Image (cartoon, grey):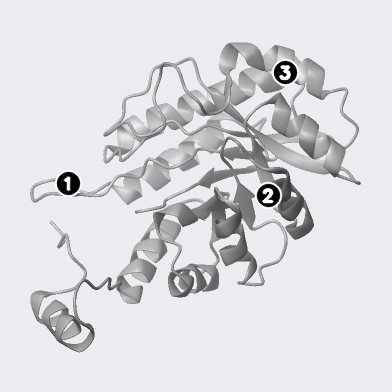
Amino acid sequence: MPSLFPLDDATCRSLAEAHGTPCFAYSGAAAAAQFGALRESLPPRVRLAYAVKANPHPELLRCFAGLGASFDCASIGELARVAALGLPPGRTFFAGPGKREAELCQALELGVRVQAEGFEDLARLDALADRETAVNLRVHPAFDIDEGNRIIGGSGPSAFGVDEEDVPALLARAAKLRHVQIRGLHVFAASNQRDAAKLLTIHGAVLDLAQRLHGAHGLSLEQIDLGGGLGIPYAPGQTPLDLAALGRGHGDLLARHPWFKGELILEPGRF
């Protein structure tokens, strides 16, 4: 079982003496090692988009940017933090309900991929955009979710995304928009799940959902965002997520879905 803490007692004592308390300290080496281990275990067609809400410290963001990470933002402040990194378009996502017009304008200006929560997001983007704009549609799935701890995923009512049964009607309305085109799906289906088999079952159900929408509605998908849910141990005796099994499973899922030529996206966040 790996240590739950990246800083030992002696280091913490030294930091407290030097900086006083309370004091927040982060190990860049530990963060980079964890990111590298996850990246190495996954197929090339799985992209990692660090969830900035987990920790927006500028040095941490620079560390992950240098390792090739994309970024998932949920506010205009997070967008500003990522914009300061000077990344090329296409490496940033913007999700969350209640997006303000200023946030949507900034997302368009920065070339950020918006995760639309419903038709209102699509219509407002369409009115603001002056060119073809690809977006991902967030869907709240009808299937049951086996989570480690429910936070914002799971089954039952949700403030996030479009209910699966309402997607066909939304796609019909979206087809009449001038600029916005749905080119991806976003399904946040789990939280803090440390069982690779359970995560892969959820991810397989998401790909099955995408296949149904592709077959029934001709939805052309460049991206399928599987959200977060990569669990970490919080107490002694808890086993870490099996990264090798997760990577093999994603390879198998992509092989089982030859219709999908795009990329999967994971938002590892705290992981």
Relative height, residue 4 to residue 14 (above, below): above
Determine the CA span between mark 1 and mark 2: 40 Å
Q: Are marks 1 and 3 in contact (CB under 8 Å)?
A: no
Disc 1 to disc 2: CB gap under 8 Å: no
Label 3: how many Cα within 10 Å (few below 14, some 14–19, many 20+): some
Mark 2 residue element: helix
Q: Is residue 43 left or right of residue 5?
A: right
Q: Nearer the viewer, mark 1 or mark 3?
A: 3
Query: Where residue 46 sits in the image (x, y, percent)?
Result: 54, 49
Residue at image mark 3: 170
Given residues 142 and 251, the one toward you in this image is 142
Q: Is 167 placed above or below 240 here? A: above
Residue wearing tag 2: 103
Residue bearing the label numbered 1: 239
Going by the numbered disc 2, the residue's amino acid type is Glu
Residue type marked 1 = Thr
Pointer 1 or 3: first along the chain: 3
**Image coords of residue 120 (percent x, y):** 72, 28
**Residue drawn where x is 70% and y is 22% of the image:** 214
